[in-house]
Amino acid sequence: MIELRHVSKSFHKRDSVVEAVRDINLMVAPREIVAVIGPSGCGKSTLLNMIAGLYAPTRGAVVYKGARVSDVNTDVGYMTQKDNLLPWRSVRDNVAFPLELAGVPKPERAERASRVIAHVGLQGFEERFPSELSGGMRKRACLARMLLYGAETALLDEPFAALDAQLKLAMHDLMLRLARENKQTVVLVTHDLMEAVTLADRVLVCTRRPATVALEQRIDLARPRDVLNIRFSAAFKELYDALWERLRVEYHEEPV
Amino acid sequence: MTGPDARRDHPAAAVDDAPADHKAARKAAGSGGMLACQILLGLAILLIWQGASGRLVDNFFISNPIDVFRRLAGWIVDGSIFAHLWATVYATGMGFIIGSVLGAALGVWLGVARNAARLVNPYLNALNALPKVALAPLFVLWFGLGIESKVALAAVLVLFLVFLNTFAGVREVDQDLIDAARLMRATRAQVIAKVILPSALSWVFAGLKISVPYALIGAVLGEMIAANRGLGYLVQFSGSQFDAAGVFAVLFVIALLAVGLNFLVEIVQHRMERWRIVSR
């Protein structure tokens, strides 16, 4: 489905060159959920930008369904770290925006938007504008927009970072359920190991910048998963500990 | 087009103006004492003027308030002032409408078409640096002595201001929002209509607001250069007749017109207030 072949990306900042990603190889199968984890600022977001076709890799190739990604990849839904809500639109109109672009008639898109807004716990805020919402609520609106869009691949950049613990669990559950229903492939960037192991089929541990894959770990936990209780199982703990051992090295080496 | 500073100047200035204007208006209206003082100040100036005229300064140069009032009253009674007033209002209004539509369209187009913008950039800079008033003889040549040449002059002044603001507004649009829309399969037309235009709208409005007085300037100047109607013509005509009272009377009418236009802009802006908050 998604294939990264020896992908590297450097940015030029005036005279200096910053290498964000170095020689990453990755294959994501259809309907697979892959979590990418690593220290913040290591180039994980760059990875998603390249899959979305917003950045071209400096070296190597990004291949999506057999075709090289050379322009904006419209088969993916991308939830960026920054909330990209249109400030002059209400929550409802923002969430329904992709449907509006696709030409879905107004009553239908309002109805579908309301349903997904309720899913993310924003009912009652449909007519509010983004500037009137908290950061976490804006995130949820973005999530709702992406869920409603139902793209075949979802790229999520720390989607649950600004949420409180209870809401985070509910969102995890919602994401897994909708990914299954919509037969979605998901690439999830996070710095929360618990979240990564709970959600993913496979976890990639990235090194500090430039990001390379330090460890790839299959998560063979049965699906559907109970996002609340899975963390207490012995299998979960084993996987978590193994990943943490490797991840710790990345944090440990960081100058304090 | 004239460097980032010049581009930013206009909307920023217009936006900063707005709250100050409101505050001043509210203060003046809120305290009756201040209003009374303002009226007293006006009366005092008129009295000093009346007293100085013929004593300190020759009446020929500065006339006096009573003569000015008589002249004005005469024009109003015989109705001759209204034809001139209407000519100026019409030229200002038409010039404003034509200039803002063309300016906004050009701004959006060049804001979106980066290569075209780079291509014409030096020429636009040169045109913008040119005092547009100097185009007046050309417009007389093209559009004749009638009202069309005044409309054209007003329109050109408005066009550049609205264009610069719109262009800057389109360039300021958050690229992340455009990327997000493109990922959601927005066509180019949809990106322009649903992301770029709404996002640039506050800039366009700022441009419209500051260009209103310029439309009036264009119309009046056009009338001063060559016309047989309009307030600008009347100033010119009175001056050439050595009629200081007439000049002052027309200036008073032009000032009233300008204040009226500003008031109109204030009302429109007030209605936009909700939208402004939203767009932030």
Image: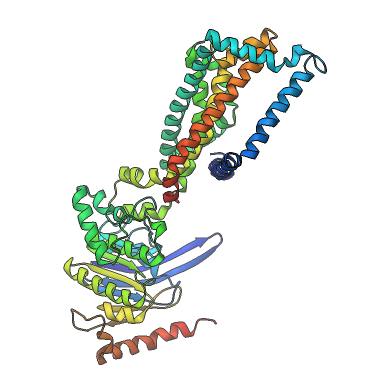
For the residue pair A90 and B1, the one nearer the viewer reads as: A90
Q: Nearer the viewer, residue A15 or A111?
A: A111
Give the residue drawn at x 38%, y 89%.
A245
Tally of numbered tags: 0
Q: Residue A243, how many percent across, how many down? A: 35, 85
In this picture, residue A120 sits left or right of residue B20? left
Residue B258 % position (x, y): 56, 27
User: Residue B233 versus residue B1: which sits nearer the camera?
Assistant: B233
At x 28%, y 59%, the residue is: A145
How is the protein colored in the picture?
rainbow
Q: Residue at x 53, y 11 (%)?
A: B229
**Which residue is more in the foreground, B151 or B229?**
B229
Residue B228 visible here? no
Q: Residue furthest right?
A: B56
- Left or right: where does residue B212 sit relative to residue B41? left
Vertically, is A26 above or below A88?
Answer: below
Q: Whole-percent x and y of residue A63?
A: 28, 63
Residue A190: % across, % down: 36, 74
Q: Residue furthest bottom?
A: A234
Q: Residue at x 53, y 44 (%)?
A: B15
Seen in the picture, residue A110 relative to B228 is either above or below; the reply is below
Is residue A244 toward the left or the right of residue A110 in the image? right
Q: Is residue A245 above or below residue B161?
A: below
Q: Is residue A92 visible?
A: yes
Q: Quadrant of residue A131?
A: bottom left
Q: Quadrant of residue B94?
A: top left
